[in-house]
Amino acid sequence: MILRPAPILAETAVSAAGVYAASPQLLQLSLAVSVLLFVIGLVGFLTRRNMIMMFLCTELMMQAAALAFVTFSRMHMNTSGQVFVIFILTVAAAEAALALGLVVLLYRKKETLSIEAWSELKEC
Amino acid sequence: MLALAAASSAPNAALPAVHSAAGDAHAGAEGAANALSGWISGAIAAPELSWAGWILGLPALAAIVCWVCAALRVKNKLPAIVTVAALGGAFGLTLALYFSYTGHYHSPVTVHLYDWMRFGWTAEGGSGAAFGSAEAFIADFGLYIDGLTLFWMLFVTGLGTLIALYASEYMESDVGGDYCRFFGSVSIFLLSMGCLVMGGNLALLYLGWEGVGVASYLLIGYYYGKPTAVAAAKKAFVMNRIGDLGLLVGIFLVWRHFGSIDFATIFKAVSQPVAADAHWSMGLIPFFLMLGAFGKSAQIPLFTWLPDAMEGPTPVSALIHAATMVTAGVYLIARMYPFFLLHPDALHTVAWIGGMTAFVAATIGLLQYDMKRVFAYSTVSQLGFMFLGLGVGTTFGAGYHVFTHAFFKALLFLASGAVMHGFAGQLDIRKISGLRNVPGFKIVSWTMFVGCLWLAAFPFSAGFFSKDEILYVAMTDPVHGSPVLAWIGLFTAFLTAYYTFRVWFRVCAGPVAFQPGEESHGHFHPHPPRVAINGVLAVLAIGAVLAGVPAYIAFFGGENWAEHMIGMSSAAQGVPSLGTSAAEHAGSAAHPTILGFDGHIAMFALSTIAGLAGLSLAWYFHLANRKAADSLKQSLLANPLVGWLPRALENKWYVDEIYDALFRKPMWAIGYVFAFVDKHLVDGTLVLGSGRLTAGLGRVFQPLYNGVLQGYAVTMAGGLGLILAWIVWAWMGGGGT
């Protein structure tokens, strides 16, 4: 497989095989975006009470992981990470359908989207 | 392995002391005794008789069919038809086996059906030599057939068939309900009994022994809704276990000392002289075996279960608890008779236990009001006579008494069952009278009359001859005999005649009067038996009469068939009187005497007097002048000197209460102590303590689990963060590596 990403920053190098290797800056930038996405997702998940928002936050964290996969795949010139991302997207699609369905059901039970309505799962 | 086992049995030597003493006393019969030890030691394999395995196979098939019927809730008489057919087939096969065995084979035969248990090992350093030398354990599924086997199987399968036929009518109120369960259990019983009697080794005997115990338990507890029936079933089972432990230990010892449990091998080994340095435990073998026999055959001290076992349906009382299973103890001792010569006191113990049981049970029978209970105690008493016979060295007398007793006792039980069936469960002899004049009960009364005559040992009845043989040998045998026991037995015979006819004169004779039992509802009229019950009663009465035919033949100088059969078996070992014909007896110079008269004639006269005296006493008190019995009892009770006696008799000598105080109460006390320790130390401290410890620890961390999803998420994120931090720290070379 030939990977030809567009050069974003000035320094690009061409490997012996004629494939562009990513520059360290590009990789750092991608990882930074990934970490940022993850942290936004995590903080959102921990602070929001609306189930749909929390669900979207988990999606954010998952995409952060996907981005990290792609980045490391590019770094090591190894396609396994990208294959993983395809799986992640597939799973995410299925999981979104499932999770939204669950949310709808939970809403029907208690007429609210707040997660605080669901706190039976505890030791008391 | 087989060779190993056979070789290991060789070192046992020296004839037991009793054996040789018997030989001296009966110098004229010594040759016969030697010939007999040759008889039992030379068993040959007879694979051509392997079809005899179907004697066990047919009841097994019937049992399977019955239990399948039970699972399918069959609502007709199919289980009874199958069982009667299978048992009848087994009886036919037994007859066929009898005819193909007698006359064609001149030694016991073994039939190997298939391998069962085989273990072998080699003893390193020969350390096992000092105490036995068993180096292999082999128990194959095979048959051991000799005269004793056939003798027993003939009446077991024959009576089994008849009683199953009787039960098909007697139990018909249960059709569609527990009918299948009943016949399934009966089939299991016949299978186990066949296994016990025909099995080729002690392991098979034990298998059958336990099998009949299980069948007996199932059938005593047949009416499981009735608390007394359940208690009786448990009692029978537990008391039998005590005896069975003895049998098991006995089997272990036989194996340890003789290197095998195969009848063919151990009989050969035991006919060798016993080694002078044999371990002392060899002498215990007969005592352990007889403990097993005492349990199964309801002898003192384990006899109290049998009268209680009458809680089962009456055909079961007749088949299992009178005619067949309870004679298994007699069979065991007769079969293992050579082993009872290993200790000089073993046979005396058997004789005394038997004699005392006969007497004690007869005294209890005097004052019971429940018809079946009277016959139950008479069964215990007659079993005591059989053990007395075994103990004084007449295996023939014991075996023949088993045979005659099987017929007349089954007859008596089935007749009382017919009364119970007809009068809605009424068994109290004070509440039924004049049965022979109640329409439809003629056959019942008169067949019962035959049974009573036979049980009371009326002159020239079969029971008279078999009991006479036992008492005669007890009176005259110079080695094993014991005149004291013979006189006790004679007195017991008098008591037997009295209590037997007490029942008949009360129930069947006198003016017609009856009250229905507790099972009646509303308008009551007697319900006479129909063709199956009447037919079986008639056949049994004829059988009881015919059971005397061998004795009549012997009386006129011929050879008793039963004596001939038992003479062809291990039961003849060490019994010099067996194998010599009656003619030789008569011609013997040293003819024993009793009270200065010729032994046979004196015994005949004494037995006749005892029987007739008991009969007339019963006639006076229970037919001619019934009020006299009551007033006599009242005056006895009023007299402080003897008033305790009727009370003790009516309460069965308080044996149950004594056992309760001696064994049950202490066991309960021990149980309470253990329960206390278990509850407070084991459960309270160790089990619950460790549980409480974990629970307490959990309660410390409980606030973390508050049910708020995000709380869990924070914990998880924090945990992940910590793990990440640790990985990074390690990555950076932390920890000084």
Image (cartoon, coloured by chain):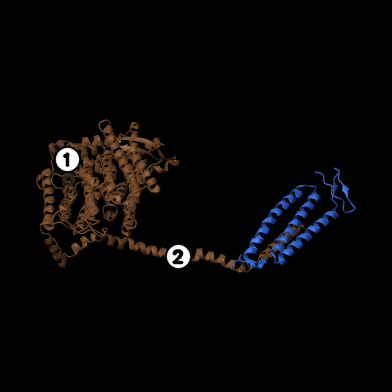
Q: Amino acid at mark 2?
A: Lys
Which residue sits furthest right?
Answer: A10
Subunit under mark 2? B
Left or right position of B51 against B368: right
Residue placed under numbered mark 1 in the picture: B551
Residue B430 is situated, as x and y percent measured from the top left of the image, at: 18, 59
Image-based side of B205 in relation to B555, left or right: right
Q: Outermost residue, left direction?
A: B597
| Residue A107 as seen in the image, left or right of residue A35 | left
Question: In the image, is residue B522 above or below residue B171?
Answer: below
Viewer-nearest of discs 1 and 2: 1
Q: Quadrant of residue B145?
A: top left
The CA span between labels 1 and 2 is 65 Å
Q: At label 1, which amino acid type do we have?
A: Ala
Rendering coords of residue A10 (x, y %): 90, 53
Label 1–label 2 contact, CB within 8 A: no
Give the residue pinned by disc 2: B679
Q: Judge whether residue B351 can be spotted in this image.
A: no
**Image quarter of the C terminus of chain A:** bottom right
Q: Horizontal and vertical percent for residue B284? A: 31, 48
- Which of the two residues, B442 or B38, is positioned nearer the viewer here? B442
Q: Position of residue B601 (x, y in %)?
A: 10, 44
Figure chain in blue: A
> Can you tell which mark lies on residue B184?
none
Considering only vertical position in the picture, is B671 above or below B242? below
Task: Answer yes or no: is residue B327 visible.
Answer: yes
Same subunit, tags 1 and 2: yes
As drawn, the chain in brown is B
Chain of the residue on which disc 1 is drawn:
B
